[in-house]
Image (cartoon, helix red, strand yellow):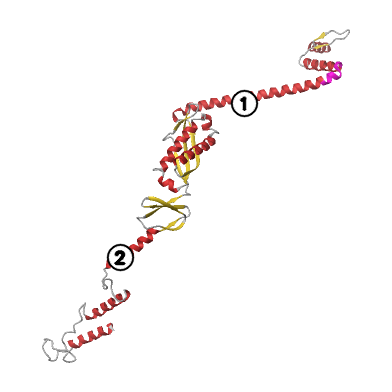
Amino acid sequence: MSRISGWGARLGAMMNENRGGPWGGGGDGGGGGPRNPWGGPPKRPRPGGSGNVASLDEILKKSRERFGGRFPGQDGRPYWLYGLGIAALLWLAFTSIHRIGPQEAGVVTRFGSYAGTMAPGIGFTFPWPIDRVQKVDVQEIRTIDIGSTDSSSENLILTGDQNIIDLAYSIRWTIADPEQYLFQIANPEETIREVAESAMRAVVAGVSLDDAIGAGRSEIEQRVEQVMQQLLDDYGAGVRVQGIAIKQSDPPAAVTDAFKDVTAAQQEAQSYVNQARAYALQLTAKAQGEAAAFDKVYGQYKLSPEVTRRRMYYETMERVLSKVDKTVVEAPGVTPYLALPEVQKRSSEGGAR
């Protein structure tokens, strides 16, 4: 309907301009005389005229239909009330509905005081600033490194035999109780670091240097983990120690060369000790074999002493005379002592003549 009225207004304007004949009025703008057919063209409607008014009315009508036939503010309510209502709805949605991840726990505080812990899933609380939810990852394994594996910094610790070693190790831990972790201690990570250093120094002070740099490292790690867990539980830190890993256990850089010399000397001494033990075991085995053989001979000797005595004599003389180049012959008409090499020499000379 508005569009039809707009076209009607345009048609009326054109008829008024062409009044007085098919060529309109005169070019002089006078009264009712006929216009010059060669006069100027009809005037076009100016922007913002009656043609645009119809379009503007149509736009306003559609806008009123969207708002139920009236604009905000036409019923006596100001515009800012609608904006305030939308802001209130968004505020309630974003501060009262909380999504807690599968590895998280939501710690709820009400006016700054602990009010409960939310399990994984969707939870609802009072809006902020009444309630506030802080999400804590309770399954993430966190790591704290103490000492350095390069020569830039040293973490010197005294051992039980008054030696000094440079230790570098790491602590793996998780959050066991979110409430205690957030509210019991002021700086949890710094507290864990200091507890780890204290426990490591206490444990290493009771072991020797060889254990600290050798096979005793695994036992040191276990003992430090136990001591740390006990201290943190006493503090109520809400932390669970997952493990200790010693990355480096070396002497200080200033005495590395001397320590290497001492280590080489210790290894050489240990080698000599091992050789002596092997030789002692060999002699012991030989003596045990000879004792067993003597026991067998003694058993035969008790059965027939004379025969055994003679056999032992012959065996002994055979063993002794096999290492000399002289032979003693005791028989009638034979020289009792003959040097066999001389006899052989004479025999060879007599044959040559």
On screen, residue 345 versus residue 226, left or right, reads: right
Tell me where residue 114 appears, x and y as whole percent: 40, 50
Q: Nearer the viewer, residue 304 or 76?
A: 76
Q: Is residue 50 above or below residue 174?
A: below
Residue type at mark 1? Asn
Q: Is the residue marked by circle 2 packed among few (<14), some (14-19), or many (20+) residues within 10 Å? A: few
| Residues at marks 2 and 1, CA–CA distance in whole angstroms | 91 Å
* Residue drawn at point x = 79 percent, y = 16 percent: 316
Q: Quadrant of the C terminus?
A: top right
Label 2 sits on a secondary structure element that is helix
Q: Which mark is residue 274?
A: 1
Magenta extent: 299-306
**Residue 327 horizontal side relative to residue 140, left or right:** right
Residue 231: x and y in percent read 46, 38
Left or right: 17 as drawn, with respect to 68: left
Residue to which mark 2 is pinned: 83
Residue sitting nearer the eye, 245 or 258: 245
Residue 121 in sight: yes
Task: Name the N-terminal-most of marks 2 and 1.
Answer: 2
